[in-house]
Image (cartoon, rainbow, N blue to C red):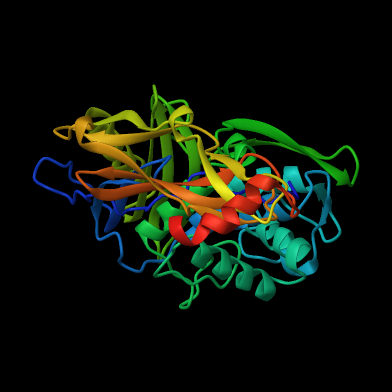
C-alpha cells in the first residue's frame, strides 16, 4: 500500500457534455446528487451538484485512499486516547488496542468507525490537523473545487464541507485502486486485534445496496443530523460502471432509494464504446542528444468511453499532442504527450502518452542528424 496509486487515465473530468436533471429523470429526495461513469467521470445527470453540503462519513473515502497510499497493510495501528473518545465508539475500543492497518481500514469503511479514522490519521500524519492538510491537498490535486476537510471521519464542523461533484471526483479516483475496491465491495467479514490477542468481531457493511441492487460494488454511506442521508454508491453491469452520490437525502433509507433511481436511469441510457486504442497509439518521437534517434511512446491500456442514448460513436476522433523532438535522457514511463479523445471536435478525455523505453544521453549518428534538422521540424 505504500506505493502511491496513480490513475492511468487523466480525463477532462466532467468536461464532456453534461446532462442536467430533466422531466424524465426520476425524482429523488436528496438536495444534491450526481451520477457519473466510473472510468472517465463523465456526468450522466446531476442536481445541485456544486452546492456545499456536509459530507458526513463519505469523508472516509479520502481518509481511506490516503492511508492505502501511505501505509503497509500490516502496519500496526494503535488506538490513542483521542481516538477512543471520538464520538460513536462503535467497536468498544480501549486505549492501546492495536489492529493492522488493513483491519482498521475495514472497520472504517464497513461500519464507519470514527475513532478508527482518527487512529489512521495519527498513524499517517502524526495528528488529525496534519492529516486534514493532506486531505485538502489531495482533494485539490483531484480537481475538487468546493471542498474543505477538517477531520478524517466527517463529524460535523462548520469548516468541513464538500459537494456531490467533488465527492464524485474523489470516488472516481478511489475506485481505480484495487485495494480500495476490495474493501468497499465487502458485505461482511471479521477483523482481529493484534492486542489484546484473540479479540475479534464480525462486521456488516452499512451499504444496503450490496447484495440487493444488481451489480452494486461500493462505496460509502454517511449520516449525521446536519448532513442527512449521504451515500457514494457504485454499481457495474457488463462494461458499464456508474457512481452515484447523493447528499442530504430525507433519511437513512431514502439515500439508497435515491441512488437506485439514479442507477436505473443511467444503466438504461449509457453504453461504452471504443475510445482510444492502445495498438493505434504507438508513436515515435525524434530524440536529440541521445544514444538513439527515436523513442517509442504509447498508452498503458485501451480507453472505453461512455455515450448516452442519441449520441453517435462516429463523432469520436483521436488526436495526438506530441512534440516532434525531445531531449535525452528519457526514462521509461515518462509522460511525453497526450492522446486526446474528441466528440464532435470537443475534447472529452485525455490519456498520457508515455515512453516505452529508456534513452540515455549520449551520441549516435541518428541523434546527431536529429539535432541538425530539429529547427526545421519542430
Seen at 58% across and 66% down, the residue is 135
Choose between 147 and 252: the one closer to the eye. 147
Which residue occupies 70% across, 55% down? 329
The one nearer the camera, 170 or 121, is: 170
Left/right of residue 78 with respect to residue 225 in the rendered view? right
Q: Is residue 6 above or below residue 280?
A: below
**Does residue 133 lie above or below 2 as drawn?**
below
Q: Is residue 272 visible?
A: yes
Residue at the top extreme? 238
Q: Quadrant of the C terminus?
A: bottom left
Query: Is any atom of residue 378 visible in this view?
Result: no
Residue 109 drawn at (x, y percent) = 60, 46
Count of marks placed on residues? 0
**Res 150 quadrant in image:** bottom right
Please name whichever residue, 148 or 38, is drawn nearer the observer in this view of the structure. Answer: 38
Residue found at the very far left of the displayed protein: 23
Q: Which percent across, then down, holds residue 202?
A: 69, 34
Work out whether residue 84 or residue 289 is closer to the camera in this orientation and state it. 289
Residue 262 sits in quarter: top left
The picture places residue 61, in percent across and down from the top left corner, at 55, 52
The residue drawn where x is 25% and y is 52% is: 46
Q: Position of residue 309 (x, y in %)?
A: 17, 32
User: Residue drawn at (45%, 58%), measured in percent from left and top?
Assistant: 376
**Left/right of residue 159 with respect to residue 246 in the rendered view:** right
Amino acid at each position: 500500500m505504500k506505493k502511491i496509486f496513480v490513475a492511468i487515465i487523466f480525463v477532462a473530468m466532467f468536461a464532456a457534455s453534461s446532462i442536467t436533471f430533466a422531466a424524465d429523470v426520476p425524482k429523488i429526495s436528496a438536495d444534491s446528487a450526481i451520477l457519473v461513469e466510473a472510468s472517465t467521470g463523465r456526468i450522466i445527470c446531476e442536481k445541485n451538484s456544486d452546492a456545499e453540503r456536509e459530507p458526513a462519513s463519505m469523508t472516509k473515502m479520502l481518509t481511506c485512499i490516503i492511508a492505502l497510499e501511505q501505509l503497509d497493510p500490516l502496519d500496526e495501528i494503535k488506538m490513542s486516547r483521542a481516538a477512543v473518545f471520538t464520538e460513536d465508539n462503535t467497536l468498544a475500543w480501549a486505549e492501546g488496542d492495536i489492529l493492522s492497518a488493513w483491519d482498521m481500514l475495514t472497520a472504517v469503511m464497513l461500519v464507519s468507525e470514527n475513532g478508527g479514522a482518527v487512529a489512521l490519521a495519527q498513524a499517517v500524519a502524526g495528528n488529525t490537523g496534519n492529516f486534514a492538510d493532506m486531505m485538502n491537498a489531495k482533494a485539490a490535486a483531484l480537481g475538487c473545487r468546493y471542498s474543505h476537510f477538517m477531520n478524517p471521519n466527517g463529524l460535523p464542523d462548520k469548516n468541513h464541507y464538500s459537494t456531490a461533484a467533488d465527492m464524485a471526483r474523489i470516488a472516481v479516483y478511489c475506485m481505480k485502486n484495487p485495494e480500495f475496491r476490495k474493501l468497499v465491495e465487502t458485505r461482511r467479514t471479521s477483523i482481529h486485534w493484534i492486542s489484546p490477542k484473540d479479540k475479534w468481531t464480525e462486521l456488516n457493511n452499512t451499504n444496503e445496496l450490496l447484495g440487493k441492487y444488481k451489480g452494486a460494488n461500493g462505496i460509502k454511506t454517511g449520516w449525521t443530523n446536519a448532513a442527512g442521508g449521504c451515500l457514494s454508491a457504485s454499481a457495474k453491469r457488463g462494461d458499464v460502471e456508474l457512481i452515484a452520490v447523493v447528499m442530504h437525502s430525507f433519511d437513512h433509507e431514502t439515500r439508497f432509494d435515491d441512488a437506485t433511481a439514479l442507477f436505473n436511469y443511467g444503466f438504461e441510457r449509457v453504453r461504452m464504446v471504443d475510445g482510444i486504442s492502445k495498438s493505434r497509439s504507438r508513436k515515435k518521437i525524434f530524440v536529440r542528444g541521445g544514444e538513439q534517434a527515436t523513442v517509442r511512446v504509447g498508452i498503458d491500456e485501451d480507453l472505453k468511453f461512455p455515450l448516452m442514448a442519441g449520441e453517435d460513436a462516429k463523432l469520436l476522433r483521436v488526436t495526438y499532442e506530441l512534440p516532434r523532438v525531445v531531449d535525452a535522457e528519457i526514462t521509461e514511463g515518462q509522460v511525453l504527450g497526450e492522446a486526446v479523445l474528441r466528440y464532435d471536435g470537443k475534447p472529452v478525455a485525455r490519456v498520457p502518452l508515455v515512453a516505452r523505453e529508456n534513452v540515455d544521453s549520449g551520441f549516435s549518428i541518428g541523434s546527431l542528424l536529429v539535432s541538425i534538422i530539429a529547427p526545421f521540424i519542430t
